[in-house]
Image (tube, rainbow, N blue to C red):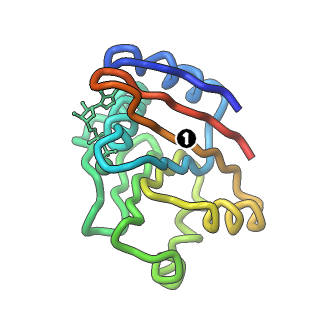
Amino acid sequence: MKTYTLSLNEIDTIVRDIAKEFKSGVVILRGDLATGKTTFVKKMALYLGVEEEVTSPTFSLQHAYSKNVFHYDMYNHGLDHFISLGMLEELEKEGLHFIEWGDEKIIEILMEAGIDVMSIDIEKISTDKREYKLCIY
Ligand SMILES: Nc1ncnc2c1ncn2[C@@H]1O[C@H](COP(=O)(O)OP(=O)(O)O)[C@@H](O)[C@H]1O
Ligand SMILES: [Mg+2]
C-alpha cells in the first residue's frame, strides 16, 4: 500500500507512478462524491495521450477513449447488472480500465478471473488536498 497526499496540480506525481507500474488492467476508484475520482481519470488520460474529453459515464456503461483507455461508473449499475451485460469481457481487453465506484466484490471477481487489478481510495482531507491510497492485488 502506498499513500499520497496531493493538491490538484500535484496529481501528476501519482499519475506518473501508475503509468510506469501498471500498464494494463483495472483500476478501481473509491471515494465519496466529489473526492476526485473523475479528476484522477482525466489526468491519467491526459498523460496517456487521450485527446477526447473525459467525463464520468454515469448513464452509459462505458466510455472507450483512444490509447486503450476505458472508463466506467458503477454507481447506477449493481455488480450483477454490470456483469450480466458482459462487462467482464470488456475488462479483459488490453489497456487501462478505470472504474469509478467499484467495490470489494468486483476486485475479488477480477482477481479470480486473473485480471490485474489495483484500487485507489481517495479521501478529502481538506478543500485543496486529497489522500490517495494505492493497493495492487
Ligand atoms: N487532488 C485534489 N486536490 C484538490 N482538489 C481536487 C483534487 N482532485 C479533485 N479535486 C476537486 O474535487 C472536485 C470533485 O472532483 P471529481 O473528480 O468530480 O469528483 P468525483 O468524481 O469523485 O465525484 C473538483 O472540484 C476537483 O477539482
Ligand atoms: Mg465522478
Q: Is residue 3 left or right of residue 11?
A: right
Residue sitting nearer the eye, 104 or 126: 126
Is ligand 1 closer than 8 angstroms to the Cβ of mark 1?
no
List the single residue furthest toward the front.
126
* Quadrant position of residue 52: top left
For badge 1, the amino acid type reads Ile
Query: As drawn, is 101 to the left or to the right of 93?
Result: left
The residue depicted at 70 percent of the width and 57 percent of the height is: 115
Place of residue 30 in the rendered image (x, y in percent of width and height, measured from the top left): 48, 49
Residue beneath the point at 40% across and 14% down: 10
Up/down of 35 relative to 128, above or below: below
Quarter placement of the N terminus: top right
Residue in view at x 36 percent, y 18 percent: 7
Residue 9's quadrant in the figure? top left
Name the residue tied to disc 1: 120
What x and y, as percent, mark residue 57?
A: 29, 59
16 up-or-down from 40: above or below: above
Compared to residue 37, the image places residue 78 above or below, namely: below
Using a 10 Å C-alpha cutoff, classify the residue at mark 1 as few (fewer than 14 neighbours), some (14 to 19) or many (20 or more).
many
Count how many numbered circles sit on residues in the image.
1
Tell me residue 44's x, y (percent). 42, 32
Q: Residue at x 48, y 47 (%)?
A: 29
Q: Is residue 108 left or right of residue 119?
A: right
Residue 76 placement (x, y as % from top left) = 34, 71
- Secondary structure state at the residue bearing disc 1: strand
